[in-house]
Image (tube, rainbow, N blue to C red):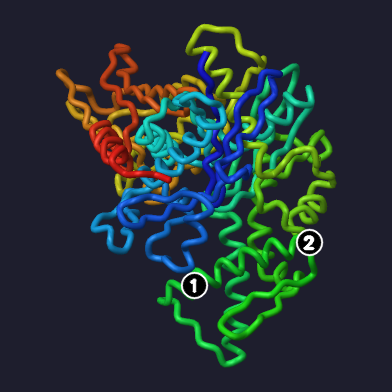
Amino acid sequence: MRKVIGIDLGTTNSAVAVLGDDGLPVIIHNREGDNTTPSAVLFDDGEVTVGKQAKNAEKSLPRNVVRYVKRFMGNPDYTFAPEGAGEAFGPEIISSFILRFLVDDASVYLAEKVEDVVITVPAYFGDAERTATRHAGEIAGLNVLQVINEPTAAALSFGLKAGYNGKVLVYDLGGGTFDVTLMDISNNNFAVLASAGDRNLGGFDFDNELIKLAEDRYRALGGSINPDDDEQQALIREQAEAAKHRLSNSDKAKIRIGTESITIMRDEFERAVSDLVTRTRYILEDVMEQAGVSYSDVDKLLLVGGSTRMKIIERSVKEWTGIDADKSVHPDEAVALGAAIVAELRSAVENGTRPVVRANVSDVVAQGLGVAVLADDGSKMLNSLVVEPNTRVPNRVEASSFSTVGVTRQINFQITEGDENGAELQYVKVLGESLLELDYDLPAKAPLRVVFVIGENQTVEAELHDAVSGRLIGQMQVRRSANLDSAEVQALRKQGKEIVVQ
C-alpha cells in the first residue's frame, strides 16, 4: 500500500512525518537534511524557490519573497505581487508551492510518489481558512484525506507513543497562531473537551515587539528608520528573529541596525511582550472554564510550537497552571508526527484495510455556528447560535426556535460563524447565504427548523425545514465567497503545474 504522510503547514516553518514500520511516526528530513522547512517562497525569473534558500533571499530580494502566508488563508483580498512577475498570487497557490516542495522531498525520502496527505490547521481556524487549506493541497495535486487541528495532532502523537491515559492540556504557540486544547485520553480514545485560540497571535507578533524595541533604541541614537525600505526591514526582522532565539538561552542579545549594535536584555523583551503573553492566558482560562475542569484535574501539560521555547512562556504557564510541562514532546515536530498517525488511520478507512495503529479521535468545533435572524423590533439582524462552540464533530444539530416574520414564499437563509448569541451580524462571519424559493405560502410566524450537519473535516451543511409539515425548504453546503470554486481550483492547479518549484 502506498505511503501517506502528515504535514504541519506552519506559518514560519513546516514539517512532514510518516508512520514507520514499527507503528511509530518519524519526521521526514528535507533535501537539506533539516527536520523543518521555512514556509518561505521566492519568485524569481519565472521559477519558485521554497524553504531556507527563499528565506535567506529576503534580505536581497524582499519584494520577491513571501512569508507568513498562513495568516491570510481564506482572505479573498490578499495577493502577493512579486516584483517583475507581472501577476499576483493568492494564499492558496502560494501555500500549494510550499506543499509541493514538502511532498517532493517526502517522495524522495520514501522512494515513491506521495499523493495522499493529512494537513494540520490551527484549532481556531474557521470554515474559510480550512477550506482554503484543503484547496491549497488540491492545487498542489494532492489528495487531502483530512484537515486536522494542530493541538489534537500533538496530543495524539504524545498519547500513542506513551500509551498515556489522562487529561492533556496542549498550549500551542506557533509562528503566527495560538491554540489551547484540553483532551481526555483513555485507551487510545482521544476526545477533545474544549478548544480555543487566536489566529493572529504567534511568534511573528513577539518579533514585532523586539523590532520596536531595537528601532526605538536606534532612533534614540540618532539613526533613521525608513519603513518603506524593504531591504532594511527584512534585515532587521531577520536579526530580531535570531535575537529572540538567543534570548531563550541568554540574558541578552544584539540586533545590528546600520552601524549600531543594539543590546536587548531578556527582562526588557519580556516586559515588551507581557500583553501578548496575557492574551494567551485569557484563552487558556477560557478553555478550562468551557470544559468545566480545574488545573488540578490536568494530568499532563504539553508546550507545542517553536514560540514556546521563550523562557517567559514556559515560566508563565507554570505559574498559571502549577504544572511542569512534559519535556518528551518536541515543540517543532509533535504536530507533524500526530498528522502522520491520522494519515494512516484515514488511509486505512479509505482502503478498507487494518490500520497499523489503533486510535479513535473525537474533535470539536472551536467556533459556534448559527443563522441570521431579525431582531424583535425589526431594526437589525442578529446572530442566533445553533451549534455551540466545542460541539463534538462529526455531528448533526437541530434547532426549532425560528419562525417567519410575515406571509412569504422566500426565505433568505444566512449561515453564521461566531460564538456570541444575539450579536449583531457585523460582529460575526456570514459563511454562506441562499435565497430559498417555496412553491407554497408560509404563514406569518410559521415555525422553522434548522439542521446543521458538520463533517469530520468540519465541513458544514445546513438545512431549513417547515417545522409543521416536516418538509425540506432548502439546503446548502457552505461555500464562502472568500473561497475558490472548483473551476478556480482546477485553473490554479493547471497554472501551478507550469511553474517550476525548487
Label 1 residue SS: helix
* x 60%, y 32%: residue: 17
Residue corresponding to mark 1: 233
Residue ranking furthest to the bottom: 222
Label 2 residue SS: loop
The location of residue 451, given as percent across then percent down, is 40, 22
* x 18%, y 22%: residue: 438
Q: Vertical placement of 360 versus 243: above or below? A: above
* Mark 2 burial class by Cα count in 10 Å: few <14, some 14-19, many 20+: few
Mark 2 touches mark 1? (CB < 8 Å): no
Picture disc at residue 296: none
| Left or right placement of residue 151 versus residue 158 in this view | left
Give, as a three-letter code, the residue at label 2: Asn
* x 57%, y 92%: residue: 222
Give, as a three-letter code, the residue at label 1: Gln
Q: Quadrant of residue 252?
A: bottom right
Q: Is residue 181 visible?
A: yes
Q: Vertical placement of 167 versus 472: above or below? A: below
* Mark 1 burial class by Cα count in 10 Å: few <14, some 14-19, many 20+: some
State the count of labels: 2
| Left or right placement of residue 386 versus residue 437 in this view | right
Q: Nearer the viewer, residue 250 or 283?
A: 250
The location of residue 498, given as percent across then percent down, is 28, 41
The location of residue 103, given as percent across then percent down, is 48, 34
Q: Tell me how far mark 2 sits from mark 1, CA to CA.
A: 25 Å
Picture disc at residue 249: 2
* x 71%, y 18%: residue: 22
Q: Quadrant of residue 251?
A: bottom right
Q: Quadrant of residue 261?
A: bottom right
Mark 2 or 1, nearer chain start: 1
Q: Vertical placement of 229 versus 1: above or below? A: below
